[in-house]
Amino acid sequence: MTVQKSIYLLAGVMILGSLALAHWVSIYWLFLTAFVGLNLFQSAFTNWCPAMSIFRWLGLPDEKSTCARR
């Protein structure tokens, strides 16, 4: 698993988990959903999020470029 795919997995789990907690525990869990969404939004422009540093520190590899080099 690569850093990028791990970020997608983490974001999906966090969003679904916070939605479930908002439904069954407290509506304030939606702030976590908003935080994850804002983090994904800013990472689209900066190509960085805090989870990237953590996953790299854990030793996950980055994705290799799929473009053919000449």
Image (cartoon, rainbow, N blue to C red):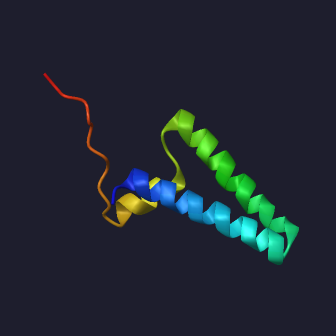
Q: In this view, does 23 lie above or below 51?
A: below
Q: Which of 55 and 70 is in front in this view?
A: 70
Q: Residue at x 68, y 46 (%)?
A: 38
Using residue 20 as the reference point, say whether residue 10 is left or right of it: left
**Residue at screen point 44% across, 62% down:** 54
Q: Position of residue 50 (x, y in %)?
A: 52, 55
- For this orientation, the residue located farthest to the right is 27
Most distant residue in the left direction:
70
Q: Count numbered badges in the picture.
A: 0
Q: Relative to 66, is 10 above or below?
A: below
Q: Which residue is drawn at 62% across and 64% down?
A: 14
Quadrant (top left/top right/bottom left/bottom right) for the C terminus: top left
**Which quadrant, please, contains the N terminus?**
bottom left
The furthest residue to the top: 70
Name the residue located 70 percent from the left edge and 54 percent from the top edge. 35
In the rendered structure, the answer to whether residue 18 lies left or right of residue 47 reads right
The picture quadrant where one finds residue 60 is: bottom left
Left or right: 9 in relation to 23 = left
Quadrant of residue 19 in the image?
bottom right
Residue 55 in which image quadrant: bottom left
State the image coordinates of residue 46 (x, y, percent, origin top left): 52, 36
In the rendered image, residue 45, in percent from the top left (x then y), is placed at 55, 33
Image coords of residue 42 (percent x, y) = 61, 40
